[in-house]
Image (tube, coloured by chain):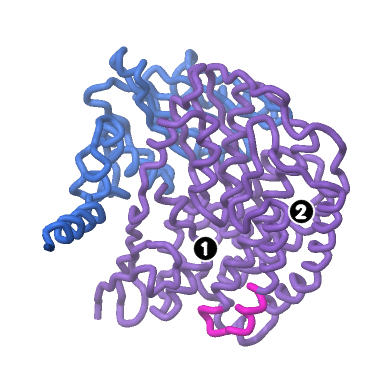
Amino acid sequence: MTSVIELGPHQLALEEPMYFRVKLEGDRVAGLDVQPGQVHRGMEHLVMRRNLYQNITLLERLCSLCSNSHPSTFCSAIEEVAGVAIPERAEYLRAVADEIKRIASHLFCCAVQANLIGQTALFRRAMEVREIMQRSKEAIYGNRMDLAANCIGGVRYDLTPDAAMYLARQMEAMKAPLDELYLQFQNNPAIMARTAGVGVLPRLEAIECAVVGPVARACGIDYDVRKKSPYGAYDRLEFSTSLQQAGDVRARNLVRLAEARQSVSLIEQCLAGLVPGPLCADLLPEIPAGEAVAKSEAPRGELVYYLRTDGTDFPLRLKWRVPSYMNWDALKVMLHGEPVANIPLIVNSIDPCIACTDR
Amino acid sequence: MTTLIDEVAALLAAAAGEETVATWRRDRKGVLTGWCRLSSADSLEAIGRAIASIQGRLSMVTAYLTEKAREKGGREIAYHFDLDGATLTLTVPLPLEGAQVPSLTPIFRNCDWHERELMELYEIQVVGHPDPRRLFLADSVPDAPFERLIPYSTFTNGAAGKALWEKVLAAKEKP
């Protein structure tokens, strides 16, 4: 029997509004129509009515979980147009901010999924571990979500020797819990029963849908912007791309947890390499007429910014594409043939960001 | 990476003629960005297929209408492609009135939302799109809101604002 149901954020445990029209054959998913736009704020229009400096503040408020990726990538685009090289110390500090956000974002995603499969203790544990990151953010940046770390030509925060030592201790405190969470998601039979072989995205279809980030890497697609198009400090940092082959919910979470563990190492490398020096250029650079593309690896994957300027302070056009924008379509493949009960878990396994998608 | 530049040059020349040339920039980290202006949208499909043949990935589509371009009677769309870390941007000039581009969705499945979004924000027709419905905007919002002034209350359907004012007016009427 064919039927059509509509699912909203309350049924899907999403903290943001997104609607799905799901076609069912019996209790199995046979078709999907994603209906975005509930939080469309016309932000691409708003950015053209603000100057480049004001836009750093506005873009940080685009979304919460990847809030640092937007201003840092936007600043990279401006710096590319202006021909500005940011100081080495600033490159490391930008990477520190990005990696702190990545760990917190990945843990949040894994925690929500643990909750969805009834693993309340694991949910609490993941959020408890994430709290170490939240407190680190609050201590260093004065805020638990928006870090306000970036400015054109560098960063607007510094790590004093005390703050660097504090962060190093916090990173040390993350290691054992992150390893333990990885083992839980990898081997715990109760979790595997709900996540292994569920919501599978085969590699060829992943390439066809052009998915990015952990969703792609869980299908064996070896693509990480930090490796493929190095920016900031990443050309000097040692890390490998986290890969899985199964393309299921479990594989996506294992990629995230491996990446979170690697981010701890990246932050430690940044702290070790933190050379003394300026945090940003002395003077605000002239922004000439020009165009640039800047990319970064946000927690959810490749983030792309295109900036076009005409020599004034206002962008002629500023366009960005967030990783989630690419990943929604793959849900049609992941959900096909799955029971209704698995829909919330599979939707959350792509770690969707709706405020980012709608803009 | 020079092989990539040569490969793209050969593909562009074969798909759109010898005069279609990309210029490349390499940033401080060695990341390549290529920039190419097409003379019209006629060769877009052929170039799209050529880029797909070397495993290029559609990364983003940027439609825009600047004041200067509007005065000259033109507009542009920039198509950004990822070539294993390098980014190639193809800029297509279009007329202000009756702008049309062929859909790239049959070649790049992920072009779907990009094209649906630009169709609802700008007066550009995407020919051959398999599913040309509105993406983000409600059907009640007028076409091409990025090209004209639309009051914010109309844009957001005015539901919240209307409910608020009804409350305010009702409170005023009370003795």
Q: As displayed, is residue A52 above or below residue A226?
A: above
* Chain depicted in purple: A
Around disc 2, counting alpha carbons within 10 Å, would you say few (fewer than 14), some (14 to 19), or many (20 or more)? few
Please, what secondary structure does the residue beneath circle 2 have?
Answer: loop
The answer to whether the residues at label 2 and label 1 have Cβ atoms under 8 Å apart is no
Closest to the camera, between mark 2 and mark 1, is 1
> Label 1 lies in what chain?
A
Around disc 1, counting alpha carbons within 10 Å, would you say few (fewer than 14), some (14 to 19), or many (20 or more)? many
Which residue is at 74% across, 49% downward? A96
Which residue is at 31% across, 49% downward? B135
Q: What is the three-letter code of the residue carrying label 1?
A: Ile
- Furthest toward the front, the residue is B175
Q: Is residue A217 magenta?
A: no
Range of residues picked out in magenta: A115-127
Residue B119, position in %: x, y? Answer: 29, 38
Among the 4 quarters of the image, the one containing residue B96: top left
> B14 or B28, which lies in front?
B28
Residue A303 visible in the displayed image: yes
Which residue is at 37% across, 22% downward? B66
2 and 1 marks on the same chain:
yes
Among the 4 quarters of the image, the one containing residue A220: bottom right
Q: Colour of chain B?
A: blue
Residue B81 visible in the displayed image: no
Residue A310, position in %: x, y? Answer: 48, 18
> Label 2 lies in what chain?
A
Judging by the rendered image, the residue that carries numbered circle 2 is: A240
Judging by the rendered image, the residue that carries numbered circle 1 is: A350
Q: Mark 2 or 1 closer to N-term?
A: 2
Q: Is residue A121 magenta?
A: yes
Q: What is the three-letter code of the residue carrying label 2?
A: Ser
